[in-house]
Amino acid sequence: MPQHKSAAKRVRQDAKRRLRNRYHKVRVRTMIKDLQAETDPTLAQEKLNAIKAKLDRLAGSRVLHPNKAAHTKSQLERHVSSLV
């Protein structure tokens, strides 16, 4: 248990941030599953663009490691290019 007010506040903030970060990570995973189930190349490209923007934002705020975001984008690009 925190002994100081600032430590208690930090615990509250961390809990809020953890929930927010988890929401965004799960949202990206769902978007990726939707993309992988897509068979139409044009719709897949649109979904890919949305995922790439989301990954870049999460990597910029350090919710995801930038290298993981880059790796994920690369793998998804390969998947979409194989649909054509």
Image (cartoon, rainbow, N blue to C red):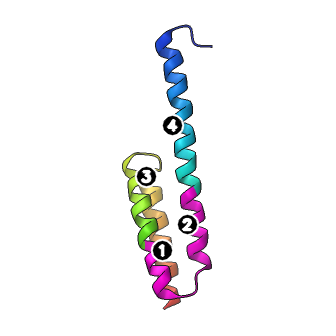
Find the distance from the CA under tag 1 to the CA under tag 4: 26 Å
The residue that label 3 is drawn on is 58
Find the distance from the CA under tag 1 to the CA under tag 2: 8 Å
The residue that label 2 is drawn on is 31
Q: Compare marks 1 and 2 and give the one earlier in the sequence.
A: 2
Q: Compare marks 1 and 3 and give the one earlier in the sequence.
A: 1
Q: Amino acid at mark 2?
A: Met
Give me the residue at 43% from left, 68% from top.
50
Q: Are marks 1 and 2 in contact (CB under 8 Å)?
A: yes
Q: Compare marks 1 and 4 and give the one earlier in the sequence.
A: 4
Where does the magenta region start and end? 27-48
Q: Is 57 positioned to the left or the right of 25 in the image?
A: left
Q: Nearer the viewer, mark 1 or mark 3?
A: 1
Q: Amino acid at mark 4?
A: Arg
Magenta stretch, main secondary structure class: helix
Picture disc at residue 17: 4
Q: Is-magenta flag for residue 52?
A: no
Picture disc at residue 47: 1
Q: Amino acid at mark 3?
A: Leu
Find the distance from the CA under tag 2 to the CA under tag 4: 21 Å
| Crowding at mark 1 (Cα within 10 Å: few <14, some 14-19, many 20+) | some
Find the distance from the CA under tag 4 to the CA under tag 3: 13 Å
Q: Nearer the viewer, mark 2 or mark 3?
A: 2
Give me the residue at 53% from left, 16% from top.
8
Helix, strand or loop under label 1: helix
Q: Residue lying furthest bottom in this view?
A: 84
Helix, strand or loop under label 4: helix
Q: Compare marks 4 and 3 and give the one earlier in the sequence.
A: 4
Q: Is-magenta flag for residue 38?
A: yes
Q: Nearer the viewer, mark 4 or mark 3?
A: 4
Helix, strand or loop under label 3: helix
